[in-house]
Each structure stands twice: as C-alpha cells, then as structure tokens.
Image (cartoon, coloured by chain):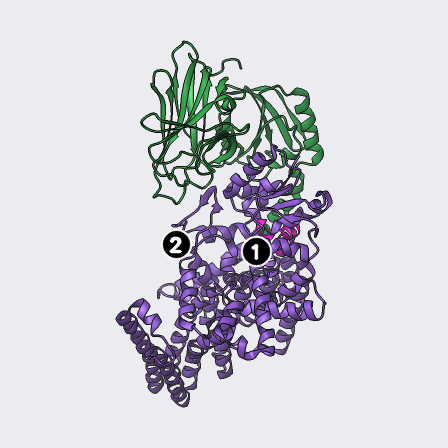
Chain colours: A purple, B green
Amino acid sequence: MGGRPATREERLIAVGLWALAFIAFLLVERAVGFVRDEGIYFTAAESYAGWFRRLFTQPMTALKDAAIVGAWDVNHEHPALMKELFGLSHLLFHQTLGWLRPATAFRLPALAMAALVPALTFLLGSAVFGRAAGLFAALSFLLVPRHLFNAELACFDMPVAAMWLLVVYTFWRAMESRRWGLVCGVAFGLAICTKHNALFLPFVLVPFALWRAWQESKAVPAARDGAWRFVGLFAAVTVLYLLLFVALGPAGFQRKFILLSPHTLLFVGLAVGTFWVLRELYRVHEPTARALLPVATMAVLGPILFYLHWPYLWHHPVERVAWYLTFHARHDHYAWFYLGDLMRSPPFPLGYVVMKTALTVPTSLFVPMVLGWLTVVGRALLSLPPRTREWVRRPSITELLVGVNAVASIAIISHPRVPHFGGVKHWLPSMPFLGILAGMAVVSGCAALVEQLRARRPTLPFAAVAVPVFALLMAPALLGLVRVWPYGTAFYSELAGGVPGAASLGMQRQFWSSHVTGVLPWINEHAKPHARVYLHEVTGYSFQHYQDNGMLRRDLQAAWSPSDADIVAYQYHQEFREHELNVWQAFGTRTPATGLYLDETPQIVVYQRP
Amino acid sequence: MFVLVALLCLLFYARLPGRLPSAADYGAVSERLKAEQRPGDVVLLFPWWTERARLYLPPEVPVVGYFGSDRDNLTAHPRIWVLGQPQLPGTGEEGFRKAFLPGRTTVGQPFQAGNLTLTLYTNGRYRPHRFVASEAYARARVYVESPDGTRRPCPFDGRAHRCQGPSHLYVAPEWHELYYEPRRCLWMHPPGGPDRLVVELDGVPSGMGLRLEGGITFENTFNRSHLSNIHMGVDDAKSGERLLDVVVPQGVPGVQKAERSLPPGEPRTVKIWSQATNPELRHLCLDVVALGAPGEGA
C-alpha cells in the first residue's frame, strides 16, 4: 500500500464534483422536510452560536461552567462540531447577512460536508482503480435516493460518512507523506467530533498500519525493533489503563481521572513516548515510521481535538465523556418494520443490514457494488492457497483497505444487539467504498467490452463504451430518485418492487416525520384561521421551523393530540396504527380528507374534523 | 450483465406508472359501490396497505385493510367487496387467495376500473351478530366489584360509564389497535388488585354462540414482562355461572378469544368483567358478541 498524490487534473475534477454536488444539494434542499432530529439540532445550534457571541462580549462569564452548561446542555448526547457549524452558519447567512432562509442557513455546513463525499470518493477511486471508476463511484453516490436525502439534512450521518472517507483517504496518503500522517490525526479528531461512528475507525485502520509497518521493516531489523517499541508502548499504556480501571473500579477510575492524575500522566506519556519512538524510527527507516505515524496522530490528536471542540467537556471532561459514551452504548431501541416483522428489541436479524442495503440501493448500482466487493474478496481468498495463487492477481493492500471499509460500518451495525432503527443512515460510511468497488467492476466490464470491439474498430475510445454504460446504469437510479423525491426514506429499489413492492414486503418507509411537507400546502389552503393542527410525530421545534421558514401558516396552532385538533396529519407507520385510530375516535370518521401517497403507498394521511 | 440488470430496471420504471390506479378509477369504483352496496357489506383491500381507496369510497361502507386482514373472517359481513390491485409489484396474490378464498364465493363478474378490480364475494364465514356488547353499552350497568360482592357504581355520563379513581377507569366503545387490527371495542381497563370492572347487560340471546374477544391495545403488550396477566370473562348474572373466561397474557399481542354455545332459553343478563392484579397499563379492549350459526342469513 502506497498512497499517491492526486494529479492536477484529479484535483480539478474533485473540486468540480464538490461544487456540482454542493450546488445540487442547495438547489433541492428546500423541498426536504425537517426531520425530527433537525428540530433539536437547530435549537442546539442557535444555543451554541449564542454562547460564541457571549464569548466575545463577556469572555470571563462565558467560560464558567454554569454559562457553558446553560448553552451547551441541549443535545449533549452528540459532539458539537456540526452543530457549532450549523449555528455559526445560521448566525452569518441568516441573522447577519439575511441571504438564506433559517433552515437553509442551518443546513449549509452539512451540505458542504456531504459534497465532500463525491469529491473524496473520486480521489480515492481514481487513485486505486482509475479515473473512470472514481467518476462512476462519485456520480452514482449522488443518485442513490437515500444518500441524496441524507445529504440535505442538518444531521451528522452524511457528515460522518464524509469524515470517515476523509480519514481513510488521509490515512492512505500518509503512507507516502509525513504531512498526511499529521493530517490524518486531525481528520480523525474532527471525525470523532462529528459523530460517534468514527470511534470505530482505529479498529479498521490500525491493522493496516501495523501490517504496512511489518512489511516495510521486513528487511531492516532496526526498523522492526522500532516498530515493536511503538507497539509495546501502546500495549503498555493500554495495560496500565486497564489495571487502573480494575484497581479503582469504574466509578473510581472516572472520579480520579483529573488533570494531575496517573490517567493524564499515562496519556502524556503515550504522546511523548510515541513522538520519541517515531523520531528514532524516522532516523532508522522512514517508510516504517510513515506507516505508524497515523496511529500516533489519531491516538494523540483525536482526544485533544475532541476535548477542545466541545466546551461542554472543558470543566468535567471525564464525567461528561463517560455519560456520552454510555448514552450510545445503551441507546433505546425504536420499533422498526422489517419484512413484515415489527422489531422492537434485540436480537435483530443478522442479515438485516445487507438486506436493507439490497432493497434500498438502486439495483443497477447495487449489483456492481456486490460484484466489485466479491471480486476483491475472491481475489484475496484465491491468492492464499498455493494451488490457486497463480490464477488471480493478489489484491493490493489499498484494494483491501477499500474492501474492508466497504463493509466495516455494515458489519458493525449488523450486530444483533446494535439498534436497528433509522435504516441506511447508520452505515452510510460504507457506501462510498462500495461505490468505488462498483466503479471498478463496471469499468472492468467496459474495458473487456472495448477490447472485444477494438478487434473491429481499433481506434474505438474507451469513453465511447463507458459513457453510455454509465448512463444506462445510472438512469434507473435517477428515475427512482425523481419518483420519490423529496421523500427519500420511502425509496425502495427495483429488487424490492419499488415503494409498493416494499409495502407488500412489510418494510418501514419513513421514521423521521419529514414527509409531512407533502400535505402542508393542503393544510395551508384548507385550515380555518387559527385552526389547531396536530402534525403527528412532528416535534414542536419542527412545527415552529415550518412556520419560521414560510412552509406553514403562522396563524395555525400546534395541537398535541387528535382530541385537541381540527386537522391531523398522521404519519403512516406500522407501529403507530393506534394513533390513526385515535383520530377516528376523536373525529368520528374513518375517511381522510387528503394524504400523501407515493405509488399508492400511504405516507401521510390527513383528517379534518367534520 | 450490468447492462442487462440496468435494462430490467428501466423496464420496471417504464411499466410502473401503468400499474397504478388513477383518481378516475377510484371514482368509477365508488360509483359502482354506491349503486350496488347493501347494508352489512364491507370492502376488503388487496394489498392490505392500499388505503388511498378510503379517500374515494362511500363513507358508509366500512373499509378493512390492515397487516393481516387477508385472513380476517369478517364474520359481521355477509358480503365482501374485494378492491384489488393485483398489478402492483410484489402483491403476492396467491397468498391472498389462499388466505381469503376458503368459504367465499364470487358473485357475478369482477368490475374493472383501470388497474382496480372490484369483486363481490358472499362470505361463508359470516355469522349474524344478534347481540354486540359495544353497541349496547349505553344501557349497561357498570360498577367496580370487590370479591366480597361490594359494588361501586360507574355512572353513565352520556358517553361513558365513569368510575371513581384514575381517569382511565371507564367503559365506552372506542377504536383501538389490537396487533395492527382496528377494532371498535369496549375499553375496560381493570381497576387492579382483586376487584373487577363489571359491565352488566340484559337481553343477551340464548340458543346461539357467545363469544368473548379482547386484548391489550397498541404497544402496551410489549417489553413489560413484569406486568401481570389480565383476566376477562362473562358470567351469568342470575346463576353466577362462569360462561366464558380468557387470560390475556402479558407479552402476547393480538386478540384472545373464547366461545361457547348457550343452550336455548330466555335471554340472559350477563356480567362482562375484567381483572388484573397489576393496575399499570392494563389497556384492555374487549367485546362480547352473540353469534348465529355460520352462513345463517347470508
């Protein structure tokens, strides 16, 4: 595995892809409803931005824990990086400049981050499998309806997919450059500041770094010794932390983790020790040192950046980080409809994530993804036994890096005890890598076809085959996207039989309340002045945001149950059927007034009190 | 191969719009139903989730479509109109026919409106409902009864029989979900402890089947293993004989039922009751029905 710098042309294409994606996201953002999480993120973002203002006007007060908690306590179950950006963007582009509506201003940083995905996908794909494969991966990523939907939201799922990709890209580049080794550490720090998915990155990347170091130091005993020292240092620190944990117990470990404590000393020791070991290693054998540098920078810079970016941690870092990690380790399970089974608690089916991916990625893109991944895995397996080794080209470590990252998030979420609500958004970090493998598979197919055709037309350019094939493979995805937009979570692939097929299969088609935008125009037109409107599953925050963004009439009042409402917009969920019956009960009718139906499937059902 | 897959996908999208019904199709079906419906008819949706139909169909005809409705006996309805969309992708028509057809006979020719197919069936699983507790609730005497026979009445306020104590202690017919099935049934949250919530009703016909059906509503049956089971039953008020008794186990969703034949005789007064040791979240909804013989009066 050796990283390589992007060529000037590749950099230009990457920038072009970023700009194309960003503009596309910006143009269609307005149609996407506010998902439940956004309501609280908008509020948190405003609160954080308010604290930053206070930091300038009353710095001494702002830095006190009471002021920090006052501003940062809201939504402290997620790190703050994206919400800080949302808040500052809102402050600048809406409140100060007035250029954007509030929601767009909040979402702008998420759009910019999401636009990184096609750009980075191209850079990595182009470097590993060639430009055409990179382009296919980048463009096809945007056409997966659920990807585009998630890219529009002021949430963390697409940003963390971008950050995951960035970390892997910088990690790979670090193999050829010391500077990129430092960048990798910074990228990892920012990734864990984005969402907790990134905490799994070291488990994916460190084995590659160690393997690379092992390979590089094979012929240099001094380098091998240095690599062992590096590993030994990490192992020793880990053991000492474990001893502390066992000796003090979980509560004691947490309580005694203060600025001047063995815990901090161990961390400082690790930082200084790795610096010293790596400095020696660079002197002895630079390639081995380069392989290990990202591990060191991730281990040292990650926690430091995580602490610094989140004022909420400044006065009580250990206690509050512990709470944050515990929250996610013990996350509630929400009901989720899957193949006719309303899953409520673990254990969940092992094949859920793979099946859900198969049914939600357009089939013309999913099939190349699977074949691309199987090709790499097949080559890797066949290259092991001596009998079959000569049949195949052994995959490079870079190809394996892509292959492993293509399934890492999928494997993590597949664990039967991990919460399964929310669908594909939780394993989005796998998708760019699967896209790259799809690009590789498609380009291989095109190359084989071109080779055959060149027997008759030797001058036939590769693009003459690749462009129509790419277009053909992406066309169904585009059609599916147009058909369901902006209700991205309702999309199901041709394999599922589309949205209606998925309804018959018994699949969840929404969970975040954003489809309600499909009936807001009807409500605005038909609701009596000052009518009480119950938007089922829509949070109070979102109700307010629909009004603030001109999507819902200002005079309408939020109601919180059918019995208090004149109009109800019920979100059709299998687990919420009782809620619709409550409307029948309260309104004395079973006949809806209108609704949002996608290819016949009920999404939102609206009732009006007779 | 990729090209072939893509072409198949394009074919899927090319065909999809032609497989969906239009508002005009629904309008035509609605007109047909208005012209030919009879009291007691019901519309069954196939596939079960094609609820858009409810926007268009005459409101006086009940429309049934829920996850599992293919198997619903629809015993209260002598005739069933199946509104089908077999052209939709992945409908599983064979499974529907297997669940629905036994005991049902087609009447006349199906009516076709675009992609909608309206087919009338006689319901061989029909059983005339001679008495329905949830419809007779207004004339009931409702009280909380202690094991020693002490009664605390729950007076009728015009809509519900309200008992002293928590606000959920009342009896009234309501719409509730029992494992996805919408049911109009009597809300009878037991009071907790050994006491029973009792609904006493006169005029229950003899010489036919008496059925008790009920269950825990919505999601209240799940993830609460610490809660006690619910008992519901029907007693003969005069003799004290236990006519029906059903345990509604915590953690088991759906309708629990029991039925027995009542010997011929005078109409009875019955006591329908619910009881649960634990008073927490015992969201019970039930009904008691006196049923004629299968097919009678169809």
Badge 1 local density, few (<14 within 10 Å), some, or many (20+)? many
State how far apart marks 2 and 1 are (Cα): 29 Å
Q: How many marks?
A: 2
Kind of residue indicated by mark 1 = Leu
Q: Tell me if I can see residue B213 in this picture.
A: yes
Name the mark on residue A417.
Answer: 2
Residue A113 rendering spot, x and y as whole percentages: 59, 68
Name the mark on residue B43.
Answer: none
Position of residue B61 in the picture relative to residue B146 (left or right): right
Magenta-drawn stretch, dominant element (helix, strand or loop): helix
Residue A122 rendering spot, x and y as whole percentages: 58, 68
Q: Please name the residue shown 65% across and 33% down the image.
A: B115
Q: Which residue is mark 1?
A: A365
Q: Under tag 2, what secondary structure?
A: loop
Say above or below: B184 vs B35: below
Badge 2 local density, few (<14 within 10 Å), some, or many (20+)? some
Say above or below: A471 vs B44: below
Span of residues in magenta: A472-490
In contact (CB < 8 Å): disc 2 and disc 1: no
Q: Under tag 1, what secondary structure?
A: helix
Q: Chain of mark 2?
A: A
Say above or below: A227 vs B203: below
Q: Chain of mark 1?
A: A
